[in-house]
Amino acid sequence: MCVKEAVINRINDICSDRGLAVNKLANLSGITPSTVYSVFDSDRKDIGIVLIKKYVTV
């Protein structure tokens, strides 16, 4: 599993565990919803560590 897949899985797990929509998770993380959705974009290859840290600390 690559880092991107792990981040996508973690986002989905957080949303599922907490009953949150992706938009709500984005707002709680201080990240724009468009940034969160861009992680799910198959054309996007890079995900910054700062972005990952914000997701994990919600």
Image (cartoon, rainbow, N blue to C red):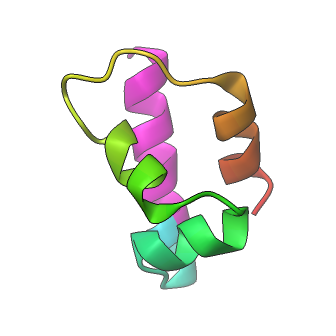
Whether residue 53 sits left or right of residue 13 in the image: it is right
Name which residue lies at 19% across and 28% down: 42
- Image vertical order of residue 12 relative to residue 25, above or below: above
Where, by quadrant of the figure, is residue 53 drawn?
top right
Dominant secondary structure (helix, strand or loop) of the stretch shown in magenta: helix
- Magenta stretch: give its range: 1-14
Which residue appears at 49% of the width and 36% of the height? 7
Instruction: Confirm whether the magenta stretch covers residue 5.
Output: yes
Q: Is residue 55 above or below residue 29?
A: above
Q: Position of residue 40 (x, y in %)?
A: 29, 42
Q: Position of residue 56 (x, y in %)?
A: 72, 49
Query: Magenta stretch containing residue 8, yes or no?
Result: yes
Q: Quadrant of residue 18?
A: bottom right
Identify the residue at the far bottom of this view.
Answer: 19
> Quick one: 41 or 6, which is closer to the camera?
41
Residue at the farthest right position: 57
For the point 40% across and 56% down, the residue is: 34
Residue 48, position in %: x, y? Answer: 62, 23
* Quarter of the image that includes the C terminus: bottom right
Number of numbered discs: 0
Residue with the most extreme left position: 42
Looking at the figure, which quarter contains the N terminus?
top left
Instruction: Residue at 65%, 36% (x, y): give it.
Output: 52
Seen from the viewer's position, the closer of residues 57 and 37 is 37
x and y percent of residue 37 in the render?
35, 52
